Image (cartoon, rainbow, N blue to C red):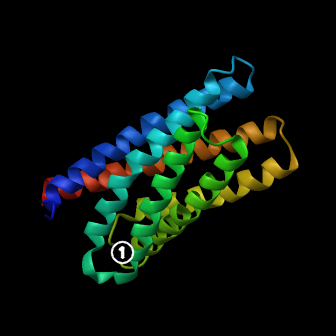
Amino acid sequence: MMIDTPLLLRAAGYSAMVAIVALIGSGITIALFFGGAGAVFGPANDLLVSATTVALILPVLGVDRVAGEGVPWLRLVSIAAVAGLILIAVGQVLLVVGVIDLGASFVTGGLGVLPVFAWVVALVLIALGPGLVGPTVGWLAAAVLVLSAATAIVSALTTGPVLWVACVALLLALTAWLATVATDLLGRAAAA
């Protein structure tokens, strides 16, 4: 059974908003954890990461629906991204319940995030190329990619204040990007 397009786009837009809330909560809990506020914030962060990734599944499907058959390669990228999001979510939950250790969760998270990054690259391409989603979505997706790379480089070099600044910049970019994804999808749902 195929879900009605306006219904899917509306659900995807609201789901992107849920992802924003979970993402901000994740950022706060990980800062509290590394700031020494208590060990409870580590598992809280893991669960919020899981919630964020689950909430991103519908936006991936919504963008795939918007692109339609005009971008056949996007379907493969979207399927891989959904699989990656599920892998991240399951890995984080398994870490919290003690089935896997932190090292294994780095593997599930690392493997899961690769197709998600591929999907973000795809968003840049379909937004700034044929304009299948709004250009702001594409530009902010590009900013997320650049800031992700910068944060990874900074984290390899230092754990000090520069890393905190990089992480906050990335969190802000992710939040702005998800807000534009939500707005774009909800606008298309209303127009359909």
Is 170 situated left or right of 179 in this image? right
Q: Please, which residue is most extreme toward the right here?
A: 157
Q: Is residue 28 visible?
A: no
Is 116 situated left or right of 169 in this image? left
Residue 66 drawn at (x, y percent): 26, 68
Tell me: residue 76, above or below residue 119: below
- Who's the residue at 78% across and 55% down the image? 153
Q: Please, which residue is most extreme toward the top here?
A: 37
- Who's the residue at 58% across and 42% down the image? 171
| Residue 98: quadrant of the picture | top right
Dot 1 amino acid type: Arg
- Who's the residue at 67% across and 29% down the image? 31
Q: Quadrant of the N terminus?
A: bottom left
Residue 91 drawn at (x, y percent): 56, 47
Tell me: residue 77, above or below residue 180: below
Q: Quadrant of the C terminus?
A: bottom left
- Who's the residue at 44% across and 72% down the image? 77
Is 155 situated left or right of 188 in this image? right
Q: Is mark 1 on a helix, strand or loop?
A: helix
Q: Can residue 39 be seen in this view?
A: yes
Q: Mark 1 points at which residue?
A: 75
| Residue 142: quadrant of the picture | bottom right
Residue 10 drawn at (x, y percent): 21, 50
